[in-house]
Image: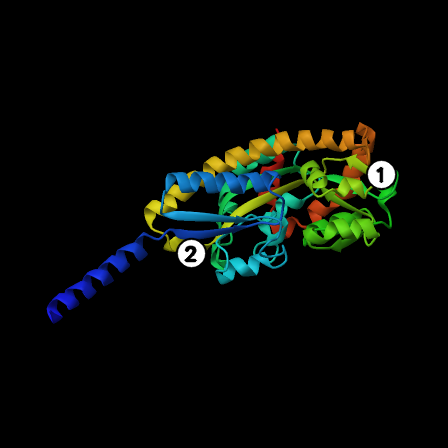
Amino acid sequence: MKLFVTLLGVLALSFSTVVSAQEPIIIKFSHVTADNTPKGQGALKFKELAEKKLPGKVEVQVFPNSQLFADDQEMDALLLGDIQLLAPSLSKFDRYTKKLQVYDLPFLFKNLEAVDRFQKGPEGKELLNSMREKGIQGLAYWSNGMKQLSTSKPQLQRPEDVKGLKFRIQDSDVLQAQFKALEANPQKMAFSEVYQALQTGVVDGQENTWSNIYTQKFHEVQQSITETNHGVILYMVIANSDWWDSLPADIQKGLSEAMNEASEYANKLAYELNEHDRQQIVDAGRAKIHTLSDADLVEWRKKMEPVWKQYEADIGKDLIDAAIKANN
């Protein structure tokens, strides 16, 4: 009888071990934007694809709108292992590598096609691995779109129109230098705080893509939006490098394939959503959209381009030259 009970105990323990081994790997994917933005849709597409490719092996939990961590907390959370995946703006990586500041340089990229060519080239691919020694593995680039300027003022046509105005920026030294070159006052601020800051006049304006402006309702608390296309907002999907390296080969392969497919989907959607949301802002009739003449654009570029030289040593002239070459 004792032997029978012992055997039952061994079998129960073995069954428990098998069940435990079959439990899916939980992957928490946190981000700060709404589900209906390119980033939000990309995260949901990755969840769908990853769970389809690795049924029962992974469970991807997506947390949008800073539900878990604000954008000034999420990097520390990733490095501590509290979350597994993030898609921060490239402006967040200043303290880990200066090379990614290339993407923040104003008027460096002509359009999103040029950005895509640079990212798919050797320099862009190498940048995904540029923070491994800091514990961060880049997996993919996701586009949000080209940046526009909005303000509480009725017009923003010439560079001198922004002089003295307070603009919210991401936590980026390059973006700070960009607005100082315009003689404006940059204010670093978390994304989740921007709407209220615009509404209450804590800041006069901000820079963002059409989809972010529309989904966050910034157009409802701004008088004008100027279509400058002066920069680009990009995300890098990242993982804790130790966690990523610890994954079984089949899991890593499946997640990589899912990420590649989700990235193509998200980047195509970014263009479509920005076009759609620009029209939504026009139809809402709250903020007036201004376009710039060629002469106006020359003046904006002239004011901002000294920032390139200012950060050339940190970024590397080779990277800046490669980005310029991608425009052709």
Reading the image, the residue beneath label 2 is 243
For residue 105, what is the image quadrant?
Answer: top right
Reading the image, the residue beneath label 1 is 156
> Could you tell me residue 47's position as x and y percent?
47, 42
**Towards the viewer: 158 or 276:** 276
**Residue lying farthest front?**
1
- At horizontal 23% and vertical 61% (from top left) the residue drawn is 12
In the picture, which quadrant includes the N terminus? bottom left
Residue 172, above or below 109: below
Q: Is residue 309 visible?
A: yes
Q: In this view, does 89 lie to the left or right of 159?
A: left
Residue 221, above or below 284: below
- At horizontal 74% and vertical 45% (from top left) the residue drawn is 306
Q: Can residue 123 be seen in this view?
A: no
Give the number of the mark in front: 1 or 2. Answer: 2
Q: In this view, does 123 lie to the left or right of 202?
A: left
> Could you tell me residue 169's position as x and y percent?
72, 50
> Could you tell me residue 247's position as x and y percent?
37, 52
Name which residue type carries label 1. Answer: Leu
Label 1: which secondary element: loop
For residue 96, what is the image quadrant?
Answer: bottom right
For residue 16, what is the image quadrant?
Answer: bottom left
CA gap between label 1 and label 2 equals 46 Å
First reached walking from the N terminus: tag 1 or tag 2? 1
Tell me which colouring the rendered structure shows. Answer: rainbow
Residue 102, above or below 12: above
Crowd rating for badge 1 (residues with CA inside 10 Å; few <14, some 14–19, many 20+): many
Label 2: which secondary element: helix
